Amino acid sequence: MNQIDGAFTIQQDRLKRRIEELAEVGKLGETGVCRQALSAEDRAGVELVRGWMEEAGLQTRIDHFGNLIGRLDGRNPDAPILMIGSHIDSQPYGGRFDGTIGVLGGLEVLQTMNERGIVPDQPIEVVAFCDEEGCRFQKGLFGSRGILGKLEPDELERTDKNGITRRQALLDFGCDPDRFEESLYAQGRIGAYLELHIEQGPILDLMEEPVGIVSAISGPLWWTVEMTGFAGHAGSVPMLMRQDALLGAAKVIVALNDLAKLDPAAPTVGTVGHLQVFPDSRNIIPEKVSFTVDLRDIDLHRRDQREQELRQEIEQIAMQHGLRYTITEDTNSKPRYCAPWIKDIIREESTKLNLRAPELMSGPFHDALALSYVCDYAMIFVRCRDGISHNPKEYASYEDIACGTELLYKTVQRMCAT
């Protein structure tokens, strides 16, 4: 059971063409994409998708958080909105499907409804959220948290590697941070949220199934750790006298890796993906090292336990090497479970389409994580080859993407039935 019986309702060729055309914006090599949040490439992508939204008959706007929103009015325009969304910003070394299929798949759903004369009971909005990835300013889910009033006090002053603040990047993008309040969604305005996304893991590929139903999103814990020692000449300071911050950081990285693997059956994962060394010279002992920690688990108790164990390891390593350290918590979210009633609809519609659609958790976070705090949500995963993502080799077949989009279409119809 790995292919839809009968013809697609959605236009598979149109969806494929748009994915391929958007992949040309910020193209990296043959298959990669670099379209970082609030960059010129991001703006070009937003304008391209906005044109397709207007072609589909949607009302469009770009809000002050940098979100692109396309709206299809329902019979009752004041009813709570059904929101469909994802993102089109990418990692600096990313692929063409991450986030993109959720935005363009959602657009295809609404365009198909318009073309078939289907008027939903409530309004439906498809959103390309700004800066889901978080790689430029080291804090993700910006647009989805923004519309809910969940930004933190210092977020606009965060800088990228070139020293550009998020505030300035928003202004350059055409947004006005002083007018955020105009772009907020009042409590209760969003009735439910749906997101289509590639799995970014190997489970569906191993099961040979094109789509899956998400059960929950694991809770991410993000830190920035700074370890400080003392610089010295690499050729003259004896090894036993050194206060090498990079050596301390390296041991913390190994400790995180070991802690994440303590229970081989658990889905715990730990990653250090960003590291800065000062003064960054080959013949100076590193004085200061700043690095990120990404720790995730679907079991909050286990994740909290690993966090405490890691804090103890950092303290011991710092004492051993005469280092000082600080830990700044950037993100701390509990696991968030999908709404059973929406999962039931997806499961019933997948059966009608001859899709098995197994249930699986999401290790990566998505914009759905932010929306889960204000409304019921659900996600549909699309198989990606070998589970590769955040890499130019990321690949999902257009047949699988069409299956996921068709399932999204059927789900939306059920949720908005007259």
Image: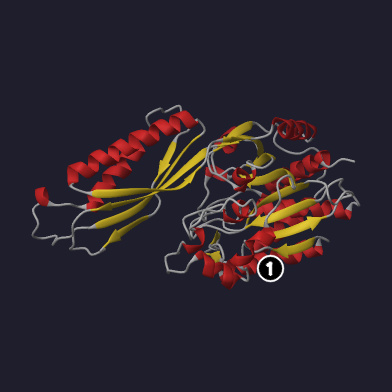
> Relative to 373, is 190 on the left or the right?
right
Q: Do we see residue 229 in this rendering?
A: yes
Q: In terms of image quadrants, where is residue 252?
A: top left
The correct choice, above or below, for 314 with respect to 287 in the image is: above
Picture quadrant of residue 309 = top left
Front residue (pair 349, 133): 133
Image quadrant containing the C terminus: top right
In the foreground, 118 or 138: 138
Label 1 is placed on what type of residue?
Glu
Locate residue 195 relative to residue 242 in the image: left or right: right
The image position of residue 93, as x and y in percent, is 49, 58
Residue 400: tell me if it is visible.
Answer: no
Q: Please provide percent x and percent y for residue 416.
A: 83, 42
Q: Quadrant location of residue 270? A: top left
In the displayed structure image, the side of residue 285 where residue 105 appears, left or right: right
Task: Give the percent coordinates (x, y) of residue 354.
Answer: 76, 33
| Residue assigned mark 1 | 47
Neighbour tally class for label 1: few under 14, some 14-19, many 20 plus, Cα within 10 Å: some
Q: Check the image and report above or below for 144 versus 344.
A: below
What residue do we see at 69% from left, 61% from top? 182
In the depicted structure, whether residue 197 falls above or below residue 60: above
